[in-house]
Amino acid sequence: MGAPQSGKRFYLMINKFPIIITCAPEDVLYYNSLTLPNEEIQVVPYGQVICSVLSQNIDLIMIDCAFDPRFGLRLLNDLKTRFPGVPILFVTEQISEEIILQAFKSGARDFFQKPLSVFNVRNTMMKLLEAKREVREHRGITSSYENIQSVKGVLCDIGVLQPSVMKVVCHIESNYQTAISLDQMATMANISKYHFVRIFKRETGMSPVRYLKFIRIQRAKELLKRADLSVHSTALRVGFQDVSNFNKNFKNIEGCTPKQFRAQWF
């Protein structure tokens, strides 16, 4: 009984989660200057946004797709499918009735055309944050685990990474149960190991080795919801040969042990 209670207290201590803004590299500096009182804003490239939301609880996402609303709509649809409980704001430089309609059909909570009115963006953000947190207070704090419908193909289905990185990402997501060395990944990408690590981290926000562990932990979270599988069996199924190593990596990525995570479901 002691461990599950401790795990639940871990989540109940949190009452505010970050805002994620994803945009093109040329817009990062602009959004880094956007502030909200007492709020944490994280600005990430397109390729990093799903990993960012999977690895932590998020209160709000804003997608700035600049001149490519079709890409923005695909990303919006993917994010809403994976994280239906997270409100999303949609920003683009091109506007039409069709784009607005598709954005709202895909689940956007509001729509902005560039150049942005900072006042309107901030005002909308604050209203959404207030409403979301009020609901959470009534329901009790909900972990982002409950928002994840499927982690299959975390980044492979998005198509926003460099081809060399995308090839390795898709291989990791399909073969995470097997041993995959850094040398094998670099060879697959057909570039030097040093250059590969630098590009991979820039594109995804994680090193290749950490991404492999990250994918294994995401798969493990789904298996831990099954009453018929032990923690040890789960560790073996996702590619960890040592349970202590599994526990260590799980806590490092998720902030709690596998047993504490599982206590939320049983």
Image: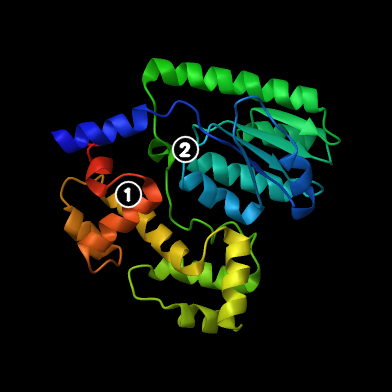
Q: Nearer the viewer, mark 1 or mark 2?
A: 2
Q: Is residue 216 visible?
A: yes
Which amino acid type is marked by label 2?
Asn
Left or right of residue 224, residue 208 in this image: right
Query: Picture quarter containing residue 33?
Result: top right
In x, y percent, where is residue 30? 79, 42
* Quadrant in which the N terminus is drawn: top left
215 above or below 87? below
Kindly report the distance in space between the C-alpha atoms of the residues bearing marks 1 and 2: 15 Å
Query: Which residue is located at x 65 percent, y 24 percent?
Result: 37
* Quadrant in which the C terminus is drawn: top left
Q: Would you call the spot at circle 2 few (<14 residues within 10 Å), some (14-19), or many (20 or more)? A: some
Mark 1 and mark 2 lie on one chain; the one further toward the N terminus is 2
In x, y percent, where is residue 218? 38, 53
Secondary structure under tag 2 reads loop
Residue 266 or residue 251, whichever sits in front: 251
Query: Which residue is located at x 58 percent, y 78 percent?
Result: 194
Q: Would you call the spot at circle 1 few (<14 residues within 10 Å), some (14-19), or many (20 or more)? A: some
Picture disc at residue 57:
2
Query: Which residue is located at x 66 percent, y 31 percent?
Result: 104
The answer to whether the residue labelled 1 contacts the one labelled 2, judged by CB atoms less than 8 Å apart, is no
Secondary structure under tag 1 reads helix
Q: Is residue 266 visible?
A: no
Picture disc at residue 221:
1
225 above or below 25? above
Query: Which residue is located at x 74 percent, y 51 percent?
Result: 24
Q: Residue furthest left?
A: 1
In x, y percent, where is residue 85? 49, 31
In x, y percent, where is residue 31? 74, 41
Which amino acid type is marked by label 1?
Lys
